[in-house]
Protein backbone atom coordinates (compact mmCIF):
# COMPACT_ATOMS: atom_id res chain seq x y z
CA UNK A 1 0.00 0.00 0.00
CA UNK A 2 1.36 3.38 -1.03
CA UNK A 3 2.30 5.50 1.96
CA UNK A 4 3.86 8.94 2.29
CA UNK A 5 4.97 10.29 5.67
CA UNK A 6 6.10 13.88 6.14
CA UNK A 7 8.35 15.06 8.94
CA UNK A 8 10.51 18.02 9.90
CA UNK A 9 7.91 20.69 10.50
CA UNK A 10 7.89 22.96 13.51
CA UNK A 11 8.07 26.50 14.81
CA UNK A 12 10.81 28.73 13.43
CA UNK A 13 11.55 32.44 13.56
CA UNK A 14 11.39 34.59 10.43
CA UNK A 15 14.60 34.21 8.47
CA UNK A 16 15.16 30.71 9.80
CA UNK A 17 15.38 27.36 8.04
CA UNK A 18 13.70 23.98 8.13
CA UNK A 19 14.14 20.79 6.14
CA UNK A 20 11.07 18.71 5.47
CA UNK A 21 11.29 15.03 4.58
CA UNK A 22 8.80 12.82 2.79
CA UNK A 23 9.43 9.11 3.30
CA UNK A 24 7.72 6.83 0.81
CA UNK A 25 6.86 3.13 0.89
CA UNK A 26 4.67 0.60 -0.86
CA UNK A 27 5.38 1.60 -4.46
CA UNK A 28 8.18 1.89 -6.99
CA UNK A 29 9.40 5.26 -5.83
CA UNK A 30 11.68 6.04 -8.75
CA UNK A 31 8.75 5.81 -11.21
CA UNK A 32 6.86 8.65 -9.53
CA UNK A 33 7.09 12.42 -9.62
CA UNK A 34 6.70 13.92 -6.14
CA UNK A 35 5.39 17.30 -5.08
CA UNK A 36 5.27 19.46 -1.99
CA UNK A 37 2.10 21.43 -1.39
CA UNK A 38 0.86 23.64 1.41
CA UNK A 39 -2.42 24.85 2.80
CA UNK A 40 -2.84 27.79 5.12
CA UNK A 41 -6.03 28.32 7.15
CA UNK A 42 -8.83 29.62 4.96
CA UNK A 43 -6.83 29.19 1.77
CA UNK A 44 -6.73 26.63 -1.01
CA UNK A 45 -3.99 24.05 -1.20
CA UNK A 46 -1.21 25.28 -3.47
CA UNK A 47 1.85 23.83 -5.14
CA UNK A 48 5.19 24.70 -3.58
CA UNK A 49 7.67 22.56 -5.50
CA UNK A 50 7.66 19.38 -7.57
CA UNK A 51 10.38 17.08 -8.80
CA UNK A 52 10.52 14.49 -11.57
CA UNK A 53 11.07 10.82 -10.87
CA UNK A 54 14.78 10.95 -11.64
CA UNK A 55 15.31 14.29 -9.95
CA UNK A 56 16.46 16.03 -13.11
CA UNK A 57 13.58 18.48 -13.33
CA UNK A 58 12.16 20.66 -10.57
CA UNK A 59 9.48 23.31 -10.52
CA UNK A 60 8.90 26.01 -7.91
CA UNK A 61 6.16 28.44 -7.04
CA UNK A 62 7.24 32.03 -7.63
CA UNK A 63 6.78 32.78 -3.94
CA UNK A 64 9.50 30.31 -2.90
CA UNK A 65 12.01 30.54 -5.76
CA UNK A 66 15.48 31.23 -4.48
CA UNK A 67 14.53 30.24 -0.92
CA UNK A 68 13.35 26.62 -1.16
CA UNK A 69 15.14 23.65 -2.74
CA UNK A 70 13.57 20.29 -3.51
CA UNK A 71 15.67 17.13 -3.84
CA UNK A 72 15.21 13.39 -3.73
CA UNK A 73 17.23 10.34 -2.79
CA UNK A 74 15.76 7.40 -4.67
CA UNK A 75 17.99 4.97 -2.78
CA UNK A 76 16.27 6.08 0.43
CA UNK A 77 12.78 6.57 -1.06
CA UNK A 78 12.77 10.10 0.32
CA UNK A 79 12.13 13.59 -0.98
CA UNK A 80 13.34 16.67 0.84
CA UNK A 81 12.31 20.31 0.90
CA UNK A 82 14.99 22.64 2.22
CA UNK A 83 13.34 25.89 3.26
CA UNK A 84 15.53 28.92 3.93
CA UNK A 85 14.76 32.57 4.68
CA UNK A 86 11.35 31.59 5.96
CA UNK A 87 8.63 34.21 6.15
CA UNK A 88 5.42 34.35 8.20
CA UNK A 89 3.45 33.83 5.00
CA UNK A 90 5.09 30.40 4.64
CA UNK A 91 3.08 29.24 7.65
CA UNK A 92 0.89 26.31 6.56
CA UNK A 93 0.45 22.58 6.70
CA UNK A 94 2.86 21.06 4.19
CA UNK A 95 1.96 17.91 2.32
CA UNK A 96 3.88 15.67 -0.03
CA UNK A 97 2.10 13.85 -2.83
CA UNK A 98 2.94 11.31 -5.51
CA UNK A 99 2.07 11.21 -9.21
CA UNK A 100 2.35 7.84 -10.99
CA UNK A 101 4.22 9.32 -13.92
CA UNK A 102 7.87 10.31 -14.17
CA UNK A 103 7.50 13.86 -15.42
CA UNK A 104 5.99 17.05 -14.08
CA UNK A 105 3.46 18.83 -16.25
CA UNK A 106 2.09 21.26 -13.69
CA UNK A 107 2.84 21.43 -9.99
CA UNK A 108 -0.81 21.57 -8.95
CA UNK A 109 -2.73 19.38 -6.49
CA UNK A 110 -5.08 17.96 -9.13
CA UNK A 111 -2.14 16.29 -10.91
CA UNK A 112 -1.16 14.25 -7.85
CA UNK A 113 -3.09 11.23 -6.60
CA UNK A 114 -1.61 10.02 -3.32
CA UNK A 115 -1.06 12.22 -0.28
CA UNK A 116 0.64 12.20 3.08
CA UNK A 117 -0.95 13.41 6.31
CA UNK A 118 0.92 16.73 6.42
CA UNK A 119 3.32 18.48 8.76
CA UNK A 120 2.78 21.91 10.31
CA UNK A 121 5.23 24.72 9.62
CA UNK A 122 4.82 27.88 11.66
CA UNK A 123 6.99 30.93 11.05
CA UNK A 124 6.62 33.42 13.86
CA UNK A 125 8.66 35.51 16.24
Image: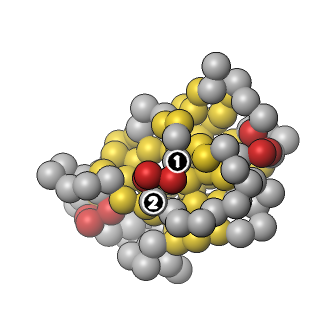
* Above/below status of 63 relative to 35: below
Q: Nearer the viewer, residue 46 or 23?
A: 46
Determine whether the residue tagged by mark 2 lies in a helix, strand or loop.
Answer: loop
**Is 6 displayed left or right of 53 in the figure?**
left
Q: Going by the picture, which residue comes out furthest to the left?
A: 42
Q: Going by the picture, which residue comes out furthest to the top?
A: 1
Residue 64, quarter of picture? bottom left
Residue 54, quarter of picture? bottom right
Residue at numbered disc 2? 108
Say if residue 89 shows up in the picture: yes
Residue 100, quarter of picture? top right
What residue sits 58% from the left and 70% below the top?
59
* Above/below status of 96 relative to 16: above
What residue sits 52% from the left and 47% below the top?
112
Q: Quadrant of the N terminus?
A: top right
**Is 14 displayed left or right of 22 in the figure?**
left
What residue sits 43% from the left and 53% below the top?
109
Image coords of residue 86 (percent x, y): 39, 67
Image coords of residue 45 (percent x, y): 32, 53
Query: Mark 2 and mark 1: span between their CA atoms?
Result: 7 Å
Q: Going by the picture, which residue comes out furthest to the right?
A: 75
Say if residue 121 shows up in the picture: no
Kindly indicate whether the residue at mark 1 contacts the one at mark 2 (C-beta within 8 angstroms): yes
Residue at numbered disc 1? 112
Amino acid sequence: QLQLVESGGGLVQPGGSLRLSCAASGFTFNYYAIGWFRQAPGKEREGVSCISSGGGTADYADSVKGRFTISRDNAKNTVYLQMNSLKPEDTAVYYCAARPLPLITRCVPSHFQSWGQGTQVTVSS
